Amino acid sequence: MTQSSVKGQEDTSKRFVNLLELCDMRSSSLLLLSFLVGVCDVQGASGFRICAFNLQHFGDSKSKKSTVMHTLTREVRDSKGKALPQLLTSLNRYDSEHVYDAVASERLGRTESYQEQYVFVYRTDAATVTGQYQYPDDKPGDVDAFAREPFVVRFKAPRTAIKEFVLIPQHTTPTNTTKELDALYDVLQHVKKMWKTENVMLLGDFNADCGYLAKKNRKNVRLITQKDLLWLIPEKTDTTVRSSTSCTYDRIVVNGETFARAVVPLSAKPFNFQMEYRLTEEQALEVSDHYPVEVLLKFTCPFSLGKLCSVMNELKLIHGKEKDLLQNAE
């Protein structure tokens, strides 16, 4: 193997490590998958990043593809149970300065031939799992509302403004999107009561656009109509890879004013990994037909470092003004 080819492989690995973290190389943190959710504590930025990514058909065969294993995943279909350990091994190998762990649901689905898992991968020095709960989906009068019942996880992240929060991931069935999204409101109320918290975020591939969620049906979805819920990914934002589609399928929703205030304004967006890593559409589709969606939570500064933080913020402000003056002078 030539030196140039080795360097090329290293460059490719570095690019996909970024995607695996769903953040850039400055990041440190909690990566969440359901093969759905990721959280990253970002150095050099004013936030703690939460990411959701729908990876298509992630199982043993796909996990053996080197490029795909450089990604962070959400949707797992792996009857042999090998994909997640392989993913963690790859992640810990490429980011040897930190330790990553995972918590996963059981395999979920109405048929044996098609099942998925929700998986949360997190960095142990940035976040701690304080609770997990598999929603039973046995509400009287609406039993089996979900094809894949939500797997709910509570995290403690002391450096965030909100400190502790609950994540509810969901991958809706396209043919049943309206009903499942409405039923998510019942899950939210159940979790809030059970854990006595308002700090809840719902996220994932909701299939919440185009032909799967007609505008005329949105008035029947409590997750949309209730005013205490904030949908962070703007309408008409394309979260799909294919150039032939433009749909806002993937969403992030926060509950309550406290959580809304903890979000960095305008930080919710899709991450176009195809453009970022200069992939063809075909190469990008090897990973997923969805872009990850992400949002930042605000940090809090320790009291002992309050003055230092204030000074640094002032320096950033001054530097920004100096830069503007120089540009204007030119």
Image (cartoon, rainbow, N blue to C red):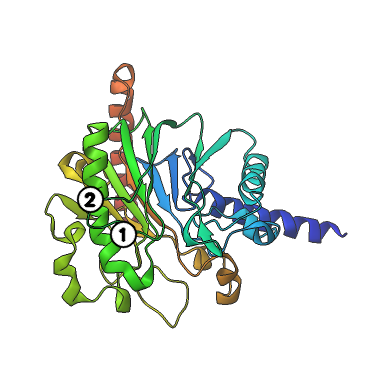
Query: For the residues marked 2 and 1, what is the alpha-carbon distance in whole angstroms?
Result: 11 Å
Query: Counting residues from the N terminus, which is met first, the one under dot 2 or under dot 1?
Result: 1
Residue 262 appears anywhere in the view: no
Question: Horizontal and vertical percent for residue 235?
Answer: 25, 68
Expressed as whole percent of the image width and height from the top left, the position of residue 46 reads 35, 40
Mark whose residue sits in front, 2 or 1: 1
Which corner quadrant of the image does residue 67 belong to? bottom right
Q: Which of the pair 176/43 is nearer the observer?
A: 176
Which residue in the structure is indicated by mark 1? 145
Q: Are marks 2 and 1 in contact (CB under 8 Å)?
A: yes
Residue at 45 percent across and 80 percent down: it is 243
Q: Residues within 10 Å of mark 1 (few under 14, many from 20)?
A: some
Say what secondary structure mark 1 lies in. loop
| Quadrant of the image occupied by residue 219 | bottom left
The quarter of the picture where the C terminus appears is bottom left
Which residue, given by chain and number where applicable, does mark 2 sit on?
186
- Furthest residue to the front? 140
Q: Amino acid at mark 1?
A: Ala
On screen, residue 295 above or below 248: above
